[in-house]
Amino acid sequence: MVLISYLSRRFSAYFLTFSLLLAVLVNFVEFVEKVVRTDSASLTDIAYFVGINFVVSLFDLAPQASWLATFFLLRELASQHEWDVLNLVGLTPQKCMAYVFGAGLLLAGGIAVVKEVWIVPLASHAQRYKLETFKQQSVDAIVDRWLMFDDGVFGHVGSFDFRTGQGTNLLLLYVDDVFLLKKIITAPTFNFGNDADALLVQQARLYDQASGQHSQLVEQTIMLQGFLPQLKADVQVPTLANLLGCVFGQGMHVPWNVRNELLYAALKRIVEYMHLILYPLLTFVLFALFVGSAQRSWFVLFIPYFLITLLGIWGDFLVLGSGVSAWLLLMLYFPVFLFLLSSLFVLA
């Protein structure tokens, strides 16, 4: 246990060092970009935003910091011949793998709790501050938003103010199964009644494709399930609990593709926490497998970073770009889990 505690302290030192370095690098670029391009905010405003963003970056970049910490710790062990000592005292690669998994699990759990309770709301505050201070946009309003509903209905909202409950420039397109236009409803203003699915439009105009005629709707109630919840999802703090609530909540009635994107955002957050386990574990396993060849061993330790980055790109492309089920994200990681499981027997 003394040896494990000693290695844990060295890993922690590397982890904290690289977390700070990465956060400083990212926010230095952010600071310079804001100073050069922003004319409407003072240096104090920029410093306040960068300070908040620095704290958020520490946690966002934690997976990459854990990979770098593992990489440099293993390199130090090899260069000082401590890796051979670990084997001599009975700390076999298989036992080390179990300790690395346990440490990664504790790190992921701790960061997940802190991030969901404090950091995600802080990041949301930083985003709101950025919109208000640097872009002069209201954070209590939705602007230029497309929506999708069941039964072939598409909507566009010019703006919607949550403080007043009033919206402007509503456009509703009704299409059939082959996306041929059936009718169009436009309204300069709209709001919601007691029912969140009841859309109240004033001075609306209706165009019917079959008859080719326009008609005036002085005041009309249109039932659109999931309209207000979709708008609220844009301003809600995106904690994991809120994301899952939007996906599985009883009142969240949205089309499959919208629900799929929300589910993907939730699964991606979970996978990001898993990276705190996968980065150290993959790096250690590759080191243990290729430690006999120094040139190959250090080269393969870069594989975890490129592999996890590539899996993230594939996930975004397949789910967000091609509309594949969000659950595919977990399937992409299945070969990684299988490799780690098989390595238990190889390192035995």
Image (cartoon, grey):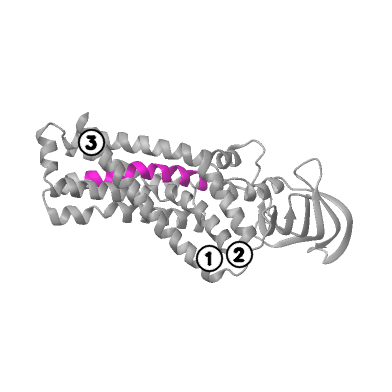
In the image: residue 326, left or right of residue 210: left
- At horizontal 39% and vertical 47% (from top left) the residue drawn is 62
Question: What main secondary structure does the magenta stretch of the protein show?
Answer: helix
Picture coordinates of residue 38, whole percent (x, y): 57, 68
Q: Is residue 245 visible?
A: yes
Q: In the image, which residues are magenta?
A: 265-285
Q: Please report whichever mark, 1 or 3, sits nearer to the chain's N-terminal start.
A: 3
Query: Which residue position holds label 3?
Result: 6
**Dots 1 and 3: beta carbons under 8 Å?**
no
Picture coordinates of residue 222, whole percent (x, y): 80, 49
Quarter of the figure with residue 310: bottom left
Q: CA distance from mark 1 to mark 3?
A: 42 Å
**Dots 2 and 3: beta carbons under 8 Å?**
no
The amino acid type, in three-letter code, at marker 2 is Ala
Check residue 282 for magenta coloring: yes
Query: Which residue position holds label 1?
Result: 34
Check residue 39 for magenta coloring: no
Q: Secondary structure at mark 2?
A: loop
Q: Nearer the viewer, residue 32 or 218?
A: 32
Q: CA distance from mark 1 to mark 2?
A: 9 Å
Residue sitting farthest toward the top: 1
Q: Please report whichever mark, 1 or 2, sits nearer to the chain's N-terminal start.
A: 1
User: Mark 3, residues whose alpha carbon is within 10 Å: few (<14), some, or many (≥20)?
Assistant: few
Q: Nearer the viewer, mark 2 or mark 3?
A: 2
Q: Please report whichever mark, 2 or 3, sits nearer to the chain's N-terminal start.
A: 3
Query: Which residue position holds label 2?
Result: 41
Picture coordinates of residue 273, whole percent (x, y): 41, 42
